[in-house]
Image (cartoon, rainbow, N blue to C red):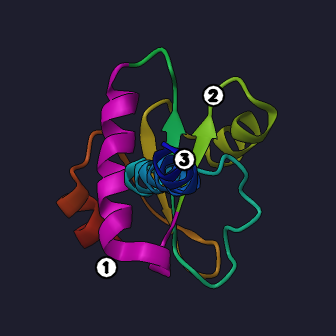
Amino acid sequence: MDTQNSNSTRRKPWIVIGVLTSIVMFFGLLLMVMPKGFKATHEQIGSGVPALVFVYDPNITLSNSQTEQMNEARAHLGDNVLFLLARVNTPEGDQLIAKYRAGSAEILLFDPEGKLIKRQFAVKSANELIQWVR
């Protein structure tokens, strides 16, 4: 019986380590598949990378659809384009909205130097966004 107790005592730390490792790996995978959020600050516009800014209004249902399409486009374009939000009724968002006279659910495209070059109302598909940026 002493042999059984010593064997089970030696196995317990490995079982705990295995369970903890599995939990950490699960959360790591979960974080990798979760969509990244969008920055709602705009100081990066004109930083040498094109910027796509969506005027996000939580009261308009198509806002969620457009952000999903932006996430998909971001997955293809990576760090070659900034994907930003201008949230209505926030100081940063309202400032950008007023400066460019943008409306709710409007998409604004800025060139790498920060000049507004295109604008259109949502919803644009991920493929349309990718073509629009190029």
Q: Which of 75 and 69 is in front in this view?
A: 75
> In what quadrant of the picture does the C terminus appear?
bottom left
Classed neighbour count for the residue bearing mark 1: other residues with Cα under 10 Å, few (<14), some (14–19), many (≥20): few
Task: Give the residue pinned by disc 2.
Answer: 88
Q: Are marks 1 and 2 in contact (CB under 8 Å)?
A: no
Q: What are the residue bounds of the magenta stretch?
A: 61-82
Task: Give the residue pinned by disc 3.
Answer: 2
Helix, strand or loop under label 1: loop
Q: Residue 75 in magenta?
A: yes
Nearer the camera: disc 1 or disc 3: 3
State the separation of the CA atoms marked 2 and 3: 70 Å
**Label 2 vs 3, first from the N-terminus:** 3
Q: Residue 127, image x and y in percent?
A: 18, 62
Measuring 49% from the left and 54% from the top, which residue is drawn there? 7
Task: Give the residue pinned by disc 1.
Answer: 134
- Asked whether the viewer can see residue 36, the reply is no
The amino acid type found where label 3 is placed reads Asp
